[in-house]
Amino acid sequence: MKKILLVEDDKTLSEGIAYSLKNEGYNVDIAHTYAQGMEFVDTNEYKLILLDIMLPDGNGYDLCKAIRIDKNTPIIFLTACDEEVNIVMGLDLGGDDYISKPFRIRELMSRINAVLRRYSNETLGNILVSDEIKIYLIEGKVEKFGEEIFLTPSEYKLLQILMENPKQALDRTILLQKLWDIDKMPRTLVTSVVS
């Protein structure tokens, strides 16, 4: 189930949004302050964060900056501030989208789905992401639920191939070609690897 963090100080609005998200199959955590939001971010992995700008103990811009220090989680700002300068600032700080209050719930759901489509199984800079698994391509590191897991070089390469080809049935021969770089091997070795 996709997990979303909603950081919104208006309790009535946050309950309404959470109810609608749950009906769409999302698991939702709600934070009403900057401090609660940061605590949730530090202890959980989310598919997406919905972030109000005006919070009682800080603001969404600063929370977005703090999240962006070490996370690529998609962020959609929710705010009554619809002036261009506020929108630009939110996007420049690392927000993926911006929706002004009041909004229709169907529009919010559509924007959430659009952002998640862009992030789903794609390379975020030098990181491959699929559900709770991340491959850090430069470091050659794999994490599951935020904890590093250790793989053999062949296991690592196989996982990378599968994550780079989501929702595809890969033929055994194709997998072997990609796994062993068969195009670069001498022909006699290729025959023994594929047979």
Image (spheres, rainbow, N blue to C red):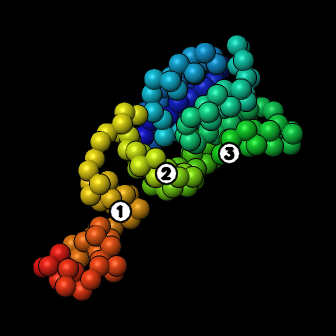
Q: Is residue 138 above or below residue 85?
A: below
Amino acid type shown at disc 3: Asp
Local SS, label 2: loop
**Gap between marks 1 and 2, in whole Å?**
15 Å
Foreground: disc 1 or disc 2: 2
- Left or right? Give the position of 160 relative to 84: left
Secondary structure at badge 1 equals helix
Identify the residue at horizontal 17%, vertical 75% (top origin): 193
Residue 49 location (% of width, % of height):
57, 35
Sequence-earlier tag: 1 or 2: 2
Number of marks in picture: 3
Quarter in which the C terminus is drawn: bottom left
Q: Which mark is residue 161?
A: 1
Quick one: label 3 or label 2, which is nearer the N terminus? Answer: 3
- The nearer-to-camera label among 1 and 3 is 1
Residue at the spot 51% in from the left edge and 55% down from the top edge: 123
Residue 97 is marked as 3
Picture layout, residue 79 above or below residue 195: above
Report the disc number at residue 125: none
* Badge 1: residue crowd in 10 Å (few <14, some 14–19, many ≥20): some
Q: CA distance from mark 1 to mark 3?
A: 30 Å
Does dot 3 land on a helix, a strand or a loop? strand
Task: Provide residue 62's location: percent of width, then percent of height.
Answer: 71, 26
Near mark 3 (Cα within 10 A), the count class, few <14, some 14-19 or many ≥20, is some
Would residue 76 be seen by someone viewing this image from the given angle? yes
Q: Amino acid type of disc 2?
A: Ile
What residue is at 56 percent from the left and 29 percent from the top? 6
Label 1 is placed on what type of residue?
Answer: Ile
Q: Residue furthest bottom?
A: 187
Q: Quadrant of residue 93?
A: top right
